[in-house]
């Protein structure tokens, strides 16, 4: 997934979003001093390589009423963790899904952020995941956030 | 970012169709709003005007490319700490004081402080986690991602 200096400038120019103008890629091209075709080629190439996951609109799920969420955690048997993790990640109510190492006093290796309109809906979704995992899951828990202590955007440093 | 639901009448059927359709993707091509608008029965200019308004009222958090954070040259690690209740505010200040702490949440668990460390290099993650351990005298459990799964998350508008 190598990216060159122009890709990095392109990332920097679009990180905050696409311009809301009829020709957004031409607008970005003007900012970078290259032409629109190159911007489009490079972005399509980055998408093909997985550097860009997708170009899309992200709704504010809070504004749309999805105000509850919990970090569900699961102890899934190792030899089925990848296969089952992929199924959990594909659920439309799961926003982040990762395999992570277990730790002392922490048996869980699969993390899935579950969203719903309220806590009860989150618990219903959690039960759906439990049913999907079946006996391959040995233990589970869910952690609700009680306070945001810090929130800053993930910044890309050293671009240029 | 707005964290409260919009009033029910804030969005009409066209707004909802836009939110649902553009979550799936947006063209990387010349005149993309014309192309995306055609499928919604909207001229490109009308689609742009709708998106501007949706952004203004806080219905959208982002519109554009979603980058793979690691591909952008960063290292990330979810970390957790068990912080005694009487030390919570003090530890929170020490942790948040590091620029590498991107976000930090209190959670209802024995492990009650969860944060993400972000740095340009993988070595930076352990360095900062070790520093936090030194400053607080508490363990920082590290949960780097081993595998990430395709994200199917969609919000029905």
Image: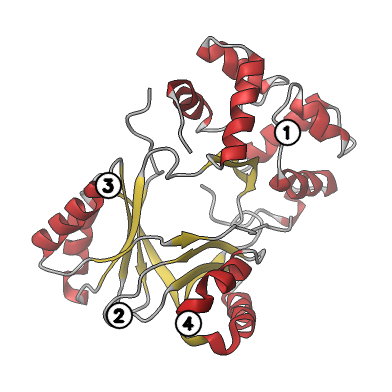
| Residue B75 at x, y percent in the picture | 34, 47
The residue under the point 82% across, 27% down is B34
Please name the colour scheme applied to the rendered image. secondary structure
Classed neighbour count for the residue bearing mark 4: other residues with Cα under 10 Å, few (<14), some (14–19), many (≥20): some
Q: Which residue carries the number 3 mark?
A: B100
Judging by the rendered image, the residue that carries numbered circle 2 is: B110
Snapshot quadrant of residue B32: top right
Kind of element beneath mark 3 = loop
Question: Mark 4 highlights which residue?
Answer: A77
Question: What chain letter is assigned to the residue under label 4?
Answer: A
Q: CA distance from mark 3 to mark 2?
A: 24 Å
Closer to us: A46 or A31: A46
Using the numbered discs, state the Cα–Cα distance from disc 1 to disc 2 in whole angstroms: 46 Å
Residue placed under numbered mark 1 in the picture: B27
Q: Could you say whether the residue bearing mark 2 is in a helix, strand or loop?
A: loop
First of labels 3, 2 by sequence position = 3
């Amino acid at each position: 997934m190598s990216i060159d200096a122009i890709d990095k400038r392109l990332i920097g120019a679009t990180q905050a979003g696409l311009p809301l103008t009829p020709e957004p890629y031409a607008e970005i091209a003007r900012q970078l001093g290259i032409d629109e075709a190159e911007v489009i080629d490079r972005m399509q190439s980055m998408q093909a390589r997985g550097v860009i996951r997708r170009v899309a609109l992200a709704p504010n799920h809070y504004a749309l009423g999805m105000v509850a969420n919990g970090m569900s955690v699961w102890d899934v048997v190792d030899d089925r963790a990848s296969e089952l993790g992929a199924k959990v990640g594909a659920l439309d109510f799961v926003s982040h899904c990762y395999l992570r190492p277990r730790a002392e006093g922490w048996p869980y290796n699969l993390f899935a952020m579950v969203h719903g309109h309220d806590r009860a809906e989150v618990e219903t979704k959690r039960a759906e995941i439990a049913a999907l995992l079946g006996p391959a899951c040995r233990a589970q828990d869910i952690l609700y956030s009680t306070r945001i202590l810090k929130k800053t955007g993930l910044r890309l440093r050293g671009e240029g | 970012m707005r964290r409260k639901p919009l009033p029910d009448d804030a969005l009409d059927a066209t707004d909802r169709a836009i939110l649902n359709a553009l979550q799936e993707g947006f063209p990387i091509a010349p005149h993309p709003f014309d192309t995306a608008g055609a499928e919604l029965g909207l001229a490109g200019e009308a689609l742009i005007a709708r998106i501007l308004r949706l952004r203004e009222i806080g219905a959208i958090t982002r519109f554009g490319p979603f980058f793979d954070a690691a591909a952008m040259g960063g290292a990330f690690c979810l970390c957790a700490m068990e912080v005694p209740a009487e030390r919570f505010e003090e530890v929170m200040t020490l942790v948040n004081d590091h620029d590498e702490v991107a976000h930090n949440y209190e959670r209802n668990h024995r492990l009650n402080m969860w944060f993400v460390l972000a740095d340009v290099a993988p070595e930076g993650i352990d360095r900062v986690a070790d520093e936090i351990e030194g400053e607080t005298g508490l363990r920082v459990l590290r949960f780097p991602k081993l595998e990430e799964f395709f994200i199917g998350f969609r919000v029905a508008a």
